[in-house]
Image: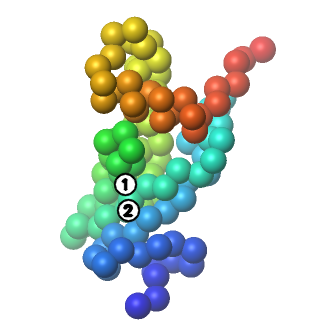
Amino acid sequence: MTPPFPGRKTSTNPSCCIVPINSLKKSGYTLNQPIYVSIETDEDTVIASLDDIEAFAYADTEFEAINGLCEEIVTLYEDLKANRDNLGILPEKWLGYLDSVITIQEKS
């Protein structure tokens, strides 16, 4: 089976694929490396998820779902950083992962 989009890996489920994301689409936030998100289509809904931090977003289109996931990632990262001293084991792992893939440029 040929993947529906060039450069994407398709899983055994034809309605699921893995897509590299190179930008969080938020000023001041830079990804140090691509992150790989799952895109699943279920009838009329598209779900974008980043399993490494258990984040997801859903929308009518792939574009909207990916944008929503990017917003969710930034919001989660900001929340985790603000509560760094009060995190449980799993949120600490999420923060460690996000710290490794995101660089924030301070505003001048």
Mark 1 or mark 2, earlier in chain: 2
Q: Is residue 41 above or below residue 82?
A: below
Residue pushed farthest left? Answer: 43
User: In this view, which residue lies farthest toward the bottom?
Assistant: 1
Image quarter for residue 24? top right
Q: Quadrant of the N terminus?
A: bottom left
> Residue 82 at what x, y percent from top left?
44, 12
Provide the secondary structure element on which disc 1 rests: strand
Whole-percent x, y for residue 50 in the image: 39, 48
For residue 20, side relative to residue 51 (left or right): right
Q: Residue at x 48, y 35 (%)?
A: 97
Q: Which of the labelled discs sits on residue 77, or is there none?
A: none
Could you say which disc has been placed on residue 39 in the image? 2
In contact (CB < 8 Å): disc 1 and disc 2: yes
Image quarter of residue 7: bottom right
Report if residue 82 is visible in the image.
Answer: yes
Q: Amino acid at mark 2?
A: Ile
Residue lying furthest front: 89
Q: Secondary structure at mark 2?
A: strand
- In terms of depth relative to the viewer, which is nearer, 3 or 85? 85
Counting every numbered tag in the picture gives: 2
Is 17 positioned to the left or the right of 6 in the image? left
Q: Note whether residue 64 is visible.
A: no
Q: Which mark is residue 48?
A: 1
What residue is shown at x 56% (from left), y 78% (from top)?
Answer: 6
Mark 2 residue crowding within 10 angstroms, few (<14) / some (14–19) / many (20+): many
- Residue type indicated by callout 1: Ala
Quadrant of the frame with the C terminus: top right
Q: Please tell me which residue is depicted at 41% across the width and 75% down the height of the picture.
A: 10
| Residue at 23 percent of width and 67 percent of height | 42
* Residue 101 at x, y percent in the picture: 57, 38
Say which quarter of the image contains residue 102: top right
